[in-house]
Amino acid sequence: MTLAVSGAGGAVAMNLVLRDRLCPDVDAHELTDEDRSEITEQFKQHPRAVREQVSGYANLLAGGDPQLRERLRLFEAGDRWWNPSV
């Protein structure tokens, strides 16, 4: 749930940034290299923030159980994401 909210929040923020920069005639607007650079930098931060939230949530779920934390770490890395039986 937290990830969905975070992802939606990031999408809304990016939409607002882009909307403020777009000229009234959308077809006539083109992004500059500066625009692309800023969007790229902002996008790079989003996956990091998501990974940090996933890690924090895994810590919370595992509590003090190191075995459970290690299992959850497999999901964090994406190694076991496809196999729900683990």
Image (spheres, rainbow, N blue to C red):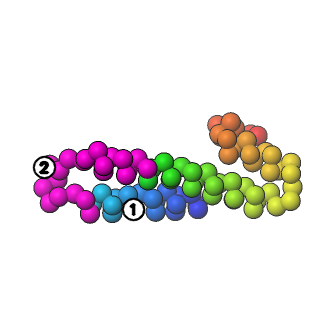
Give the label on residue 12, or none: 1
Looking at the rendered image, the quarter that the N terminus falls into is: bottom right
5 displayed left or right of 42: right
Residue found at the far front of this picture: 34
Q: Work out whether mark 2 precedes mark 1 in sequence or the reverse, and give the earlier one.
A: 1
Residue at point 12% right, 55% down?
A: 25
Q: Quadrant of residue 2?
A: bottom right
- Residue 30 percent across, percent down from the top left: 20, 47
Residue at point 57% right, 55% down?
A: 49
4 displayed left or right of 38: right
**Residue linked to disc 2:** 28
Residue at point 26% right, 63% down?
A: 20
Looking at the rendered image, the quarter that the C terminus falls into is: top right
65 displayed left or right of 18: right
Give the label on residue 80, or none: none
| In the image, residue 25 lies in the stretch drawn in magenta | yes
Residue at point 25% right, 59% down?
A: 21
Residues in magenta, as a range: 20-41
Residue 29 in sight here: yes
Of 13 and 82, nearer the camera is 13
Q: Amino acid at mark 1?
A: Val
